[in-house]
Amino acid sequence: MRGTVFLATLLLGVSCAQAHAEMPVDVALVLATDISASVDAAEYRMQMAGLAAAIASEPVLDAIAAAPRKRIAVAVTQWSGLRVQRITIPWTIVDGEASAQNLARRILSAPRADSGGGTSLSLALEHAAKLLAAAPPATRRVIDISTDGINNIGPPLDAIRDQITRSKITVNGLAITSEWPKLARYLDENVITGTAAFTLETDGYGDYGAAMLTKLLREIRGPGLS
């Protein structure tokens, strides 16, 4: 009898967790992080620290709480060249301080997937779009891609961006312009797409966290509410 009760409780917990994951969210957001060869170890750590600080910040928590469903879904990927498009953190619900802090800790402790290769924005976008196909139901689906370089390996961007556009996915860019001063314009012309898509820029990794905070707020609040 005791074993039966334990099993029933366990199954109920699993069922509740699955139901929680399948509840609609305001936005399903893939955070795609550049770890190509141009990103050194210190810059990688600044990206992770900046992303973690932004996701757990009070303004982001306030934005989530003000949204209709008061919850978002986040997945984090790392990408570089032909072989590295890796899910660092699978789909995770953020619906308050505890879940945001937990996600921030996981981001900070995530190991770098690879020492770095080329910069395949095209494959990173393709991978992120496939990941969104398995996301919880969402009012909006967004790829948030940050990079310090242009697409220099892998398939051309045009066909992949067109497919993403047809799928009604928004792609926003964060251009780190320390090596490519006109990178934001490149992302505007070749990468971003979808409703109210935008590119932000920062001139170095030291300001990455501040730029990411601004970006997350716009993505959570949605078009017309930035």
Image (tube, grey):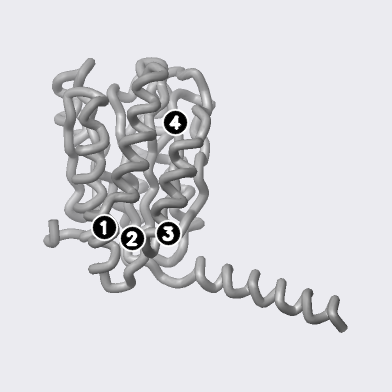
Dots 2, 4 in contact, CB < 8 A:
no
Residue tagged 1: 220
Looking at the image, is 17 positioned above or below residue 86? below
Q: What residue type is labelled 4?
A: Trp
Badge 4, how many Cα within 10 Å: few under 14, some, many 20+? many
Q: Where is residue 98 in the image (x, y as percent from the top left)?
A: 42, 59
Q: How crowded is mark 3: few (under 14 residues within 10 Å), some or many (20 or more)?
A: few
SS under mark 3: helix
- Disc 1, disc 4: CB below 8 Å? no
Q: Is disc 4 placed on a helix, strand or loop?
A: strand
CA separation in Å, label 3 and label 2 = 19 Å
What amino acid type is highlighted by mark number 3?
A: Ala
| Quarter the C terminus occupies | bottom left
N-terminal label among 4 and 3: 4
Q: Residue at x 46, y 19 (%)?
A: 116
Identify the amino acid type marked 1. Answer: Ile
Residue that numbered label 3 is attached to: 98
The Cα–Cα distance between marks 4 and 3, rounded to whole angstroms, is 28 Å
Q: Mark 2 points at which residue?
A: 27
Q: Quadrant of residue 186?
A: top left
Distance between the Cα atoms at labels 2 and 4? 22 Å
Specify whether 60 is left or right of 107.
left
Indicate whether 37 appears above or below 52.
above
Q: Mark 2 is on which residue type?
A: Val
Pinpoint residue 96: horizontal percent, then vertical percent. Answer: 37, 63
The residue under label 4 is 79
First reached walking from the N terminus: tag 1 or tag 4: 4
Tell me the CA gap for discs 3 and 1: 18 Å
Query: Which is more foreground, mark 3 or mark 2?
Result: 3
Residue drawn at x 46%, y 51% is 102
Task: Return the x and y of residue 27 as percentages of the image width and height.
Answer: 33, 60
Question: Is tag 3's residue or tag 2's residue first in the polypeptide sequence?
Answer: 2
